[in-house]
Amino acid sequence: MEKVLEKLNQLESGQVGIIIYSQVKQEILLSLNKGLLVPLASAAKVAMAFCIVKLVEERHFEWTDIVEEILLNPKEDSKEVYPHFQGRENLALQDAVEVMIACHDSFVAERIVQFCGGWEMINNKIKSYFKHINITQNPRDLNNNGELSEMLELLRLIHQGYITNPNLWTPVINGLVRQRGEIEGIPSHFLNHMTGGLDNVIVDIGIMGEFFKNPLIFVLGAKELPNRYKEKLADEIITETMKLLYDEYINQEVKL
């Protein structure tokens, strides 16, 4: 983990935080600025999905319920990931949640939230579990944010939920698995994650490794960075950090 930390320390400006949790050891392996509050951008959709799962678990809704007036965001990649959903006017709730995560689709997110009771209800729901996570209608809103430590716990509960009750959590996991955030050098099936970003923010949260082979659960956030559309160094450092995290997972597997 020292190499991961050394790489992140190469960020010369801004604030950065990371938490890495070992499923096999049931403990945190690395924690840097765990209380850092970061804008989540699209990564907030994972918190939204957590709320929907809880509503289904409490029997307010069923995964087979139909969400009407579906509109897929043409600026996202659903045409490539879900070509069979193009032109659909409705989707089952489970499919809508999956698309929302896999394609970072804010249009689908809007329809899901309205179907399930509105933004205020969803935000209150997430705050009943995580008081420092705030969800807003506009994913680019800086108040659409969360504390890294709570995002780590959110992911840990999602992973554990899938292990113990896969039928309930499958739409969320399917979305994470199908999200097209590949990094060269890391097998795509070993990186199941959700990214989020703004002009000066990078967020990456997810599960590194095979689900049933002691994965590492991670959250990483950096803010107050130089404009990422003009300066690529921060993105390059984060990418290299993810590669080092993959190395840590592989070495863990070897030791086991």
Image (spheres, rainbow, N blue to C red):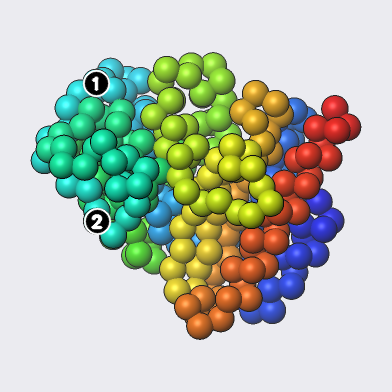
Compared to 33, does 250 lie above or below?
A: above
Q: Quadrant of residue 11?
A: bottom right
Query: According to the image, label 1 marks what residue?
Result: 64
Query: According to the image, label 2 marks what residue?
Result: 74
Marks 2/1: CA–CA distance = 25 Å
Would you say 142 lies left or right of 160 here? left
Picture disc at residue 49: none
Q: Are marks 2 and 1 in contact (CB under 8 Å)?
A: no
Q: Is residue 15 visible?
A: no
Name the residue: 58% across, 42% down: 188
Q: Quadrant of residue 66?
A: top left
Per the image, label 2 sits on a secondary structure element best described as: loop
> Residue 164: x, y in percent?
54, 16
Name the residue: 53% across, 58% down: 203
Mark before the other along the chain sequence, 2 or 1: 1
Name the residue: 67% across, 67% down: 237
Amino acid carrying label 2: it is: Pro
Q: Residue furthest right?
A: 255
Local packing at callout 2 (Cα closer than 10 Å; few below 14, some 14-19, many 20+) is: few
Would you say 121 lies left or right of 3 here? left
Per the image, label 1 sits on a secondary structure element best described as: loop
